[in-house]
Image: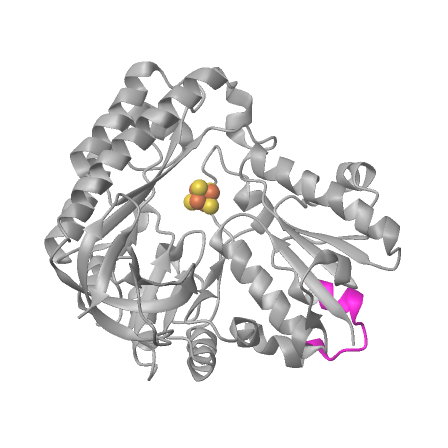
């Protein structure tokens, strides 16, 4: 029997791709290894959204070169967003890598490493539920690729154009996951709000919500990521009314300045974004909001950064994922220069983090004394951890095995990052 090891960095799509690959490899008779040193096949699933992610991948591959020296038969594969159409530079730089695969290349990996295996049976139109064995929450990709070409983003060049999976495949995969014990699915894509555009009958994300909601035994539906320009009234209505859809929306704003948004190619302005937030808050009670923000985009002046900062203060997000701009060769923004200094980017990033710590502390403090519904996922350092419908991390002490339990929890303490509670 052969062993595999997958190392993953990057977004949830990458994690879902790794899970799909793991499921397919297990169907082909491979076993999960505890470390690369014990594996016959090591797959590094890479990310190229920012330079530091790429540096970590190079570091990991450097360490794997030692593994290969001590066990020359080990196959090392590099998969994911670092692998473009022309991989000649990577091949020259990474002699320890045997094979290069683009993102989500389950079929190609199987074809290469187990050529005799009937690949279609394992992939079953994308069903890879086996790799989520024992999990309470799982990712289900619903749309691959992206048509938006935001000027800073390499993703459309690496993951290609939008391709939605048929509703029936997604429902079948969710049913399969539920049979294995999963209670919560996150419907995933680079832009889930444009789900279904090219499918027969053009179902949209609202239609998909209702279909997945019908899966018996499933407790919760989440979705990630949404493009603000595609957050339609119909979708807002569905978030408000489909019972299993959680009251949590991640709506990446990226900048709070109209001129910067224009140069980012985001196709909305700040007023439009705030109007969408108001509609969501009017329609969905107890809504939690998250956003993504880039600081130090080419040409971002201090005043323009201040506009982003002011937007964060006005909206009061539950979570802000902030990143310093990182020049990505091959994107339109790569030609705009990278004129905000490293120190200034760092200062802006820290200012946002400090602000967000204050905002999140105040939002979470309001939950102390309240009773919330928590789905417990795991035991960490002697404490059970789970999430509220609004995606807040909650810790409780319990001597029982409560993995997979959906329970009422009274919140007794809050920090900006998590809550502490007692089973009610
Ligand atoms: S919507 Fe923009 S940021 Fe998101 S994946 Fe597509 S191009 Fe990248």
Quarter of the N terminus within the rendering: bottom right
Quarter of the C terminus within the rendering: bottom left
* Quadrant assignment, res 119: bottom right
97 relative to 16 in the view: left or right: right
Image quadrant, ligand 1: top left
Q: In the image, residue 412 lies at what x, y percent?
A: 18, 56
Q: Is residue 118 magenta?
A: yes
Q: Is residue 315 magenta?
A: no
Whether residue 308 is visible = yes
Magenta-drawn segment: 109-119
106 relative to 421 in the view: left or right: right
Q: How is the image coloured?
A: one colour
Q: In the image, residue 98 lies at what x, y percent?
A: 82, 52
Count every numbered label the image shows and give the total.
0
Q: Residue at x 47, y 48 (%)?
A: 147
Residue 159 higher or lower than 24, as above or below: above
* Quadrant assignment, res 222: bottom left
Q: Residue at x 12, y 58 (%)?
A: 285
Residue 188 higher or lower than 31, as above or below: above
Residue 101 higher or lower than 351, as above or below: below
Q: Residue at x 20, y 52 (%)?
A: 413
Given residues 122 and 286, the one toward you in this image is 286
Given residues 110 and 74, the one toward you in this image is 74
Whether residue 269 is visible = no
Q: Residue at x 74, y 69 (%)?
A: 3
Residue 43 higher or lower than 170, as above or below: above
* Quadrant assignment, res 186: bottom left
Q: In the image, residue 71 lies at what x, y percent?
A: 86, 56
18 relative to 99 in the view: left or right: left
Q: In the image, residue 65 lies at what x, y percent?
A: 80, 45
């Amino acid at each position: 029997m052969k062993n595999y090891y997958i190392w993953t960095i990057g977004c949830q799509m990458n994690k879902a791709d790794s899970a799909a690959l793991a499921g397919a490899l297990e169907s082909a008779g491979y076993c999960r290894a505890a470390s690369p040193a014990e594996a016959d096949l090591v797959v590094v699933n890479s990310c190229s959204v920012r330079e530091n992610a790429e540096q970590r991948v190079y570091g990991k591959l450097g360490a794997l070169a030692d593994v290969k020296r001590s066990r020359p038969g080990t196959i090392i594969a590099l998969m994911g967003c670092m692998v473009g159409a022309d991989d000649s530079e990577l091949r020259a730089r990474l002699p320890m890598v045997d094979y290069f695969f683009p993102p989500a290349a389950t079929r190609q990996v199987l074809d290469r490493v187990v050529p005799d295996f009937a690949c279609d049976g394992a992939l079953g139109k994308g069903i890879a539920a086996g790799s989520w064995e024992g999990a309470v929450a799982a990712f289900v990709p619903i749309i691959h690729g992206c048509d938006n070409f935001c000027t800073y983003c390499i993703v459309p060049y690496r993951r290609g154009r939008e391709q939605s999976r048929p509703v029936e495949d997604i429902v079948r995969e969710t049913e399969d996951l539920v049979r294995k014990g999963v209670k919560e699915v996150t419907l995933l894509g680079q832009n889930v709000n444009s789900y279904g555009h090219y499918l027969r009958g053009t179902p949209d994300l609202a239609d998909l919500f209702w279909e997945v909601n019908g899966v018996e035994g499933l407790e919760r539906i989440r979705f990630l990521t949404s493009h603000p320009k595609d957050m339609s009234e119909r979708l807002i209505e569905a978030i408000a009314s489909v019972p299993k859809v959680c009251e949590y929306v991640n709506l990446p704003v990226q900048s709070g300045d109209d001129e910067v948004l224009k140069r980012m190619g985001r196709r909305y302005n700040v007023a439009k974004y705030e109007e969408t937030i108001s509609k969501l808050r009017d329609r969905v009670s107890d809504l939690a909001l998250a956003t993504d923000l880039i600081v130090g985009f080419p040409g971002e002046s201090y005043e323009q950064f201040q506009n982003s900062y002011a937007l964060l203060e006005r909206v009061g997000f539950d979570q802000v994922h902030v990143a310093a701009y990182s020049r990505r060769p091959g994107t339109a923004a790569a030609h705009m220069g990278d004129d905000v200094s490293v120190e200034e980017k760092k200062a802006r990033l820290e200012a946002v983090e400090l602000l967000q710590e204050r905002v999140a502390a105040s939002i979470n403090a309001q939950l102390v004394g309240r009773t919330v519904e928590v789905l417990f996922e795991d035991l960490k350092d002697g404490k059970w951890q789970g999430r509220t419908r609004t995606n807040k991390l909650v810790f409780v002490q319990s001597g029982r095995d409560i993995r997979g339990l959906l329970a009422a929890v009274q919140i007794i303490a809050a920090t900006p990052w998590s809550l502490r509670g007692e089973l009610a």
